[in-house]
Image (cartoon, helix red, strand yellow):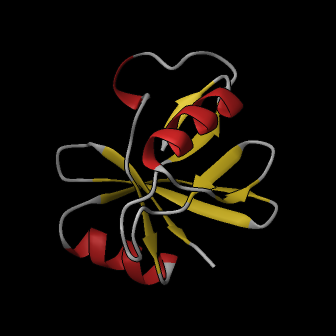
Amino acid sequence: MINTTDVARLVKFWSALLGVEVRRESPDFVFLTPQQPGGIAVNFQRVPDPTEGRRRLHLDLSVESLEAASERILELGGSRVEDHEVPGFAWRVMADPDGNEFCIAAME
């Protein structure tokens, strides 16, 4: 996930560079298709101000179940940070044992 104040500009750049299409979008989020089935996709979220430091870019992992993935992360020594939801899309911020944050989301 890439934080940006100008989603359209970055979507145009990254989709052309990677040769991929938009998979899903809402007013504040755009998800690109992976370059290959099962591959990693680049996604964008609108933020009100430029993001400074470590949270400008972070991992978002697609999971089958938020609850099952959260339990597994906790079992491995990670932690749950916070939950978010917008119409039609929910995600959870988790952290690894060093406190590095990443998001998990069940993509339909």
Give the answer, above or below, for where 94 lies relative to 71: above
Given residues 56 and 90, the one toward you in this image is 56
Answer with left or right where residue 57 lies relative to residue 108.
left
Q: Residue at x 57, y 61 (%)?
A: 91
Given residues 20 and 95, the one toward you in this image is 20
Percent of width and height locating residue 97: 18, 52
Percent of width and height locating residue 71: 35, 78
Circle count: 0
Quadrant where the C terminus sits is bottom right
Percent of width and height locating residue 70: 39, 72
Figure quadrant of residue 24: bottom right
Q: Residue at x 65, y 64 (%)?
A: 90
Q: Residue at x 19, y 64 (%)?
A: 77
Given residues 37 and 86, the one toward you in this image is 37
Q: Residue at x 55, y 45 (%)?
A: 15
Give the answer, above or below, for where 105 lies relative to 19: below
Give the answer, above or below, for where 66 lies relative to 25: below
Answer with left or right where residue 67 lies relative to residue 49.
left
Answer with left or right where residue 12 lies relative to residue 28.
left
